[in-house]
Amino acid sequence: MTAPISTNQTILVVGGGISGMTAALEAAECGKQVILAERNTSLGGRTALLYRYFPKMCHPTCGLEINLRRLKNNRNLRVLTQTEVVSVTGQRGDYTVALKISPRYVNANCTACGECAKAVETEISNPYEYGLAKTRAAYLPHAMAYPQRYVLDPSIVSTADGEKARAACKYDAIELGMQPETVELKVGTVVWATGWKPYDAAKIQPYGYDRFDNVVTSLEFERLADPHGPTGGKLLRPSDGKEARNIAFIQCAGSRDENHLRHCSRICCMASLKQTQYAREAYGEEGKSTVYYIDIRSIDRLEDFYLRVQQDPTVKFIKSKVASIKLDEASGDLILHGVDTEGYHRYAAQHDLVVLAVGMEPESNGIALPADIVTDSSGFIEGAADGGQFAAGAASSPLDVNRSVQSATAAALHAIQVVHQTAAAEGA
């Protein structure tokens, strides 16, 4: 690959989720040269894997489709996928960035016809289904993937399956000899839009995520509800494929806890309220959702959504921090133990499925950030000491999609200001 042309007037955006796309587009549409680097195989981040947004319950296509159209039509924006930042050196207005680009083994000739996937036999855990399903080792990441191009898993590149994939391609799109590359760029400012990751539910020992198949995370439940997901949109519990008609939603799973994440992750309450409506849509009056909560944190227009859910007769709220979960061997159901703090009585409640509203932690916790990047006590990025690098979206704080977009727009404006001031200083 030829390194993109870049100068100290170029803005680098790291991370191609909804925040990174927004920051890159806002800057590019203001006439700035922007490079958007995403370490995964496609743009969209976790937003692309949602079934619906709250509170309007619309699908991610509502926002992502528009952004993809804007992106395709903007010549100021260069997108690099499977690209990670190796190092950032320099100072405000004059950074040198090294990027490592991993091979896709599929070039731009790809038409997404899918013949390579039909030809291979090897299956891998689908990285876009949180381990709930497998996919062929030649795959299209998901329906809204950009670029709309297949990927070959490295495990088959030097195997007979790799050769089968190449032979099946009619467009000479399979390049098994692709190698990792490192490119160096000059940029004036960096926007870190590296997003978030779910807290490891296995660390919450009393809830048995690593012991019980029918304890899932809120992100996994989102995929179960999606018609494009592993179960075709049916709410089936993983242990036996039985319909989950009596579902427990446990709030603050890992959040607001000195043993796990000290901060409130902000999105969890609304995510669970939204997901109770998935059960309502699936089963009508025959479904049952129980929300176990410390308190429900919803504000502004989100409060209206909460009030609507409260009026739903299929949804029950129990003010309690669940103490433990046990398995009923005979039925495969899960028994939740705790104390209802409003009635001060103990309960042992049986449910088909338990959904943990896991907390958000910054994805940047696993990234080698520049030494002068300032983070808070939870690892969220506050910016660079010299004011030349900024955070956008959930990289800066636990935020929902709407507030992530607002944060990203602000970060883009800060980045534009830096390159303007750099240009002015050089012209003085």
Image (cartoon, rainbow, N blue to C red):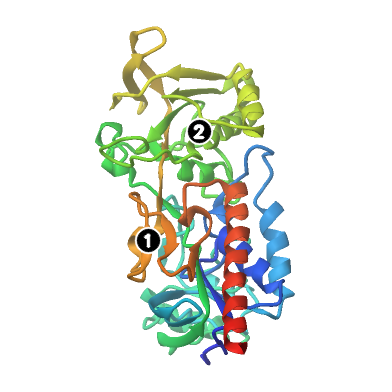
Judged from this view, the residue extending furthest toward the front is 428
From what the image shows, is residue 240 above or below residue 48? above
Residue 387 point in image, percent of width and height: 47, 67
Residue 139 disc label: none
Q: Quadrant of residue 334?
A: top left
Q: Quadrant of residue 318?
A: top left
Residue 349 point in image, percent of width and height: 38, 17
Tell me the amino acid under the disc marked 1: Val
Which residue matches tag 1? Answer: 374
Quick one: quadrant of the C terminus?
bottom right
Which residue matches tag 2? Answer: 269
Q: Residues within 10 Å of mark 1 (few under 14, many from 20)?
A: some
Observer able to see residue 425? yes
Question: Number of marks in the image?
Answer: 2
> Residue at the location (25% across, 38% down)?
259
Disc 1/disc 2 C-alpha distance (Å) = 29 Å
Nearest the viewer among 417 and 102 is 417
Left or right: 330, with 275 as reference point: left
Q: Quadrant of residue 371?
A: bottom left
> Residue at the location (71% across, 52% down)?
62
Q: Secondary structure at mark 1?
A: strand
Tell me the amino acid under the disc marked 2: Cys
Q: Nearer the viewer, mark 1 or mark 2?
A: 1
Nearest the viewer among 353 and 62 is 62
Residue 78 point in image, percent of width and height: 61, 79
Residue 152 point in image, percent of width and height: 47, 75
From what the image shows, is residue 322 above or below residue 256? above
> Residue at the location (45% across, 37% down)?
241
Left or right: 146, with 381 as reference point: right
Left or right: 238, with 232 as reference point: left
Of the numbered discs 1 and 2, the one sitting upstream in the chain is 2
Nearest the viewer among 91 and 283 is 91
